[in-house]
Image (cartoon, rainbow, N blue to C red):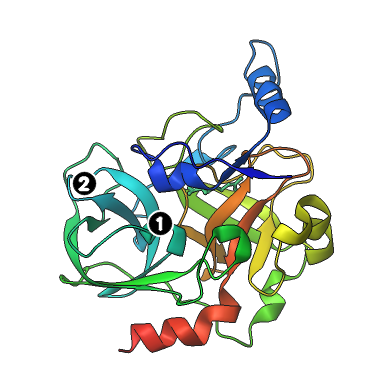
Amino acid sequence: MFGLDRASRTVRRRAAALAVTAAATAAATALTGAPGAVAAPQPIVGGTTTTTTAYPFVMQITDASQNQFCGGTLVAPTKVVTAAHCMVGETTSSVRVVGGRTYLNGTNGTVSRVSRIWIHPNYTTATRGEDVAVLTLSTAMPYTTAPYVSASDTAVYAAGTTARILGWGTTRSGGSSSNQLRTATVPTVSDSSCAGSYGSSFVAAEMVCAGYSSGGVDTCQGDSGGPLLIGGRLAGITSWGQGCAQAGYPGVYTRLTTFSSLVTAQVTS
Ligand code: ARG
């Protein structure tokens, strides 16, 4: 029922890979952007611009030419948490991590090569879960790291809790990326409600949803791998969704409490 759009493996390749699309959706999105309609969705749909000074742990994951395709979160000077689906097909020589660079077209900040890519061993596709990866950097990042949830912190996901999303993703489903880092807040959604949206594609033990029932604010293509912060801690990883910011279809994030111990094993190795 939800067709996974795997068509685009260009610049936003991994980003676009998990956009779940529907023809009706495209029509609805187009209408939202019409003149005189409700405010058009903005990157990190419905968000505002921010900087890596404000959020120093937000990393660009780029190709070897420093073209961003995913986000990541610095959790230790040489460790970055991102989505497994961002790393599929990548090698230690094909990716870079860029810190301290607010703009996609900037040249500032710190660029590091990656010496190791750990992808959850059971990862297959984002809609099956286990969408988590940890990168080990060759160069330590001189930026403040983000704390992340521990396995017992499951209460952070209580429905209605405010969560912060960040990234350089597209302004709307199928749109273009934001040159500047953006952020927004969205409420977490109960597992039963999210299962109502996504059926068996939503795996409650591995995923958490966030968004307004009316839509309008969401992560989008290119935001994948980036942080969902709750109470200032990394609690989720941008993973997938049907379109972006659609009413009734919240964003789906990796439920980090489930993978916290595995991540720690990578962070300390
Ligand atoms: N899969 C997208 C990416 O790779 C993230 C999509 C998030 N979608 C959403 N509706 N929240 O960047």
Residue 180 position in % (x across, y down): 37, 38
Q: Nearer the viewer, mark 2 or mark 1?
A: 1
Can residue 55 be seen here?
no
Q: Is mark 2 within 8 Å of ligand 1?
A: no
Q: Nearer the viewer, residue 124 or 244?
A: 124
Where the C terminus falls, by quadrant? bottom left
> Residue at 18% of width from left, 58% of height from top?
110
**Mark nearer the N terminus (2 vs 1):** 2
Marks counted in the figure total 2
Q: Amino acid at mark 2?
A: Gln
Q: Quadrant of the N terminus?
A: top right
Q: Does the Cβ of the disc 1 residue fall within 8 Å of ligand 1?
A: yes
Residue marked by disc 1: 86
Q: Secondary structure at mark 1?
A: helix
Above or below: residue 148 compared with residue 237? below
The x and y percentages for residue 105 are 24, 36
Residue at numbered disc 2: 66
- Rendered location of residue 101, percent (x, y): 26, 49
The type of residue carrying mark 1 is Cys
Dot 2, how many residues are within 10 Å of its Cα: few (below 14), some (14-19), or many (20+)? some
Q: Position of residue 138 (x, y in %)?
A: 16, 71
- For the residue labelled by badge 2, is the local secondary structure a helix, a strand or a loop? loop
Q: Residue at 61% across / 24% down in the picture?
A: 40
Q: Would residue 78 be found to the left or right of residue 132 on screen?
A: left
Disc 2 to disc 1, C-alpha distance: 15 Å
